[in-house]
Image: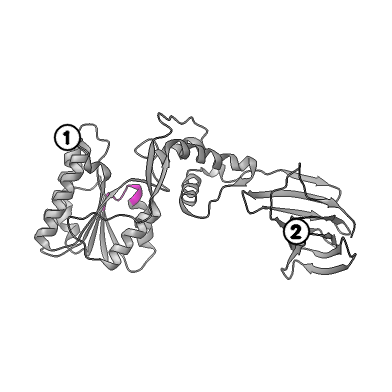
Amino acid sequence: MKVLITGSNGFVAKNLIVRLGESEDFEVVTFSRQSSILQLPELVSDVDAVVHLAGVNRPPSPEEFVSGNTGLTQSLCQALLEYGRQVPVIFTSSTQAAIDNPYGKSKLDAENALRDYAAQSGASVYIYRLPNVFGKWCKPNYNSAVATFCHNTVNGLPIQINDGNAALSLVYVDDVVDEFIRVLQQQPLVDAVEFCAVSIQYQTTVGKLAQQLQTFRDSRTTLISEKVGVGLMRALYSTYMSYLTPDAFAYDVPKFGDPRGVFVEMLKTQDSGQFSFFTAHPGITRGGHYHHTKTEKFLVIKGQARFGFRHILTDETYELFTSGDQPKIVETIPGWSHDITNVGEEEMLVMLWANEIFDRDRPDTIASKV
């Protein structure tokens, strides 16, 4: 499928072009602000679909709303009609099309131009009145609060908030791209007077957004990660991370050392414990304690290990051996004292997960020999 993408230098277009380029099913041709409107007839002559993302939202003069939004869309429709083919068009309008201002009116007129094209050609037109779109490669200090807040938070700059309770409706660029690709592939029938929508939308406030981004930044110090695996938190965290510059790709974490080896905490979670690693020199034993509730998972990455266990009530004992050559998880059991000894001839390296963050006031770690 050959697809024309207008506004190809915009951030939504960049994400869409990359995704389409990952599939052999699509060939992309582009139209940007550097292109001439006179090129449109040639560009649409043999395309199978158009994704119309071009638009103007911060022009030097209000008149450019008309030329950049309405005029360009009318020219696109005229070029398509000249070839007499039913070429589907996906159009990113704006929620402001329902508002009486120069920008909104230009978007509304563009929508009507596309509806006229659909009526004359019989082609499907998919109009999306998108709320605030956010994601990687969105330009800060332009028209996205998320982009601006991410940029400022990453760079330690202040964030200006006039009303922290102001509502924000958001859609994530990956979800927008998924929706557009679905439409390009399936081309479902639509009523020309209806609007299409990205099914996944998020609601938050300006204040909550700023606070959440600050928490992401602080996590490099606290080591506590937010629940960034699903939903809005996942999308925001990915977006925040995309604004890091190469000199900020890495950060130090505390290392605690003694004659036995070193211990390093890597990551803590709000409700799923923490990750760390430690080393032990040959012959060194670590541990020698039990837990009432806490459980752990040990993975020897390098070296040879002996795990010892003793039931604190029955004195039943048990031992097992693992090595970095054959990965095996060893779990500690509440009520069993346990230790780990380096029985090899090289330094031992062990990864450790505990199901809760260590609390110095309530460590749940009671010394007891195995």
Is residue 344 visible to us here?
no
Span colored in magenta: 6-12
Is residue 48 visible to us here?
yes
Q: Residues within 10 Å of mark 2 (few under 14, many from 20)?
A: many
**Which amino acid does the dot numbered 1 rest on?**
Glu
- Colour scheme: one colour
- Sequence-wise, which precedes: disc 2 or disc 1? 1
Q: Residues within 10 Å of mark 1 (few under 14, many from 20)?
A: few
Q: Is residue 183 left or right of residue 244?
A: left
Residue placed furthest toward the front: 313
Mark 1 element type = helix
Q: Residue at x 29, y 63 (%)?
A: 183
Residue 106 in the image: state x and y as whole percent.
18, 41
Q: Tell me, yes or no, whether the highlighted magenta stretch contains residue 8.
A: yes
Residue 55 in the image: state x and y as whole percent.
24, 44
Residue 207 in the image: state x and y as whole percent.
46, 35
Q: Which residue is mark 2?
A: 350
Quadrant containing the N terminus in the rendered view:
bottom left
The one nearer the camera, 154 or 162, is: 162
Q: Which of the numbered marks, if any, corresponds to residue 63?
A: 1
**Which of the 4 quarters of the picture holds residue 321?**
bottom right
